[in-house]
Image (spheres, grey):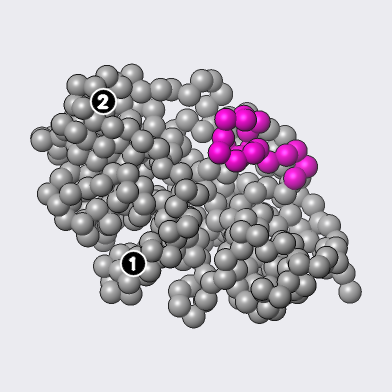
Amino acid sequence: MSITNHQFQLASRPVGAVQRSDFHYVGEALRALADGEVQIKVLHVSLDPAMRGWMNESKESYMPPVAIGEVMRAIGVGRVTASANPAFAVGQHVVGLLGVQEYAISNGQGLNKVDPALAPLPMYLSALGMPGLTAYFGLLDVGQPKAGETVVVSGAAGAVGTLVGQIAKLKGARVVGIAGGTDKCRYLVEELGFDAAIDYKSEDVGAALQRLCPRGIDVFFDNVGGDMLDAALARLALHARVVICGAISQYNSTGPVKGPANYLQLLVKRATMKGIMVADYYPRATEAMTEMGGWIAAGKLKTREDVVQGLESFPETFQRLFSGENKGKLVLQLAAE
């Protein structure tokens, strides 16, 4: 009996915010496996800001664009349901680029086995997945915070930002988060232990940074870009480190990306600005997952997954990343275990 695989295929290059009309929702019969392939029932799909860039035709990205008519690229976690690959047995759980679809067929490259007995499956898409690795290596390898320094995180209530702030606290830094809304700011301070939070929706970020960071910013971990980056550059401390992780404020822009107007502060403060690309650190993934897993088990690191039900809701759920509606790591649940 054949299996119908429902999936979202990219229908057109989005202009501005992503619309449902930018995708085709189709059902296709699953083909038979070739030697070395594995069939995976996708259980959870990670929704990440980087996916917006993958929809563009730009050749300047770290990954090729998703082709028109191709299944929308996404990291997912699922269960092996058929295998012609001796490295993967039926019933095992794996994480990898599975796509926005009910079933994926893979040659096994890029798949990693995960154990649902050690952590809930959505956590392998958050603290024990790409956001966790990004936060860990971006902060510790690139930002290199020292005890007593001030670390500021933009997009602080998101999947990466929440982890960056908590790791910085574990390393003895003073942490200020920038987020949108009273509830998110309260969550950062009261539940995650940030020292302070700035609500960019109701406060002047530049004035708040001046008040909360009187000695300047030693490490700025940027997930937002645009005006937020400019405000932080104006408050850098001597020998500051700026970590460029993302620029979600620019992803839906129909014009040129807004660059930093205050970049001369890097000269004045003898500061550095460096990007973090998580793929560079995959060979060291075990290092990060082991340490963060220990922190989670000890109650020192908290995670929050915002799980939304149903494959068909993908286009609308994805937009929650840009409206600021998500609380923590946004995950789409396709099926129960």
Could you tell me which quadrant the C terminus lies in?
Answer: bottom right
Q: Which x, y percent locates residue 194?
A: 22, 53
Left or right of residue 190, residue 162 in this image: right
Amino acid type, residue under disc 1 in the picture: Glu
Q: Which residue is mark 1?
A: 291
**Residue 147 part of the magenta segment:** no
Q: Are marks 1 and 2 in contact (CB under 8 Å)?
A: no
Q: Residues within 10 Å of mark 1 (few under 14, many from 20)?
A: few
**Tag of residue 79:** none
Name which of mark 1 and mark 2 comes first in the sequence. Answer: 2
Tell which of 194 and 183 is nearer to you. Answer: 194
State the CA–CA distance, disc 1 to disc 2. 32 Å
In the rendered view, would you say 69 is above or below 205?
below
Does 115 sit left or right of 29 as displayed? Answer: left
Quarter assignment of residue 271: top left
Q: Say which residue appears at 83% left-offset and 57% top-offset.
A: 28
Q: Which residues are magenta?
A: 53-70
Above-or-below relation of 85 to 327: below
Residue in view at x 65 percent, y 60 percent: 109
Query: Which residue is pictured at 18% across the width and 49% down the height?
Result: 146
Q: Amino acid at mark 2?
A: Leu
Q: Is residue 152 above or below residue 299?
A: above
Question: Does residue 52 appear anywhere in the picture?
Answer: no
Q: Quadrant of residue 299?
A: bottom left
Q: Tell me if residue 262 can be seen.
A: yes
Identify the residue position indicated by label 2 in the image: 266
Label the magenta part by its dominant secondary structure: loop
146 or 69, which lies in front? 146
Q: Position of residue 196 (x, y in %)?
A: 19, 47
Does 38 appear above or below 53?
Answer: below
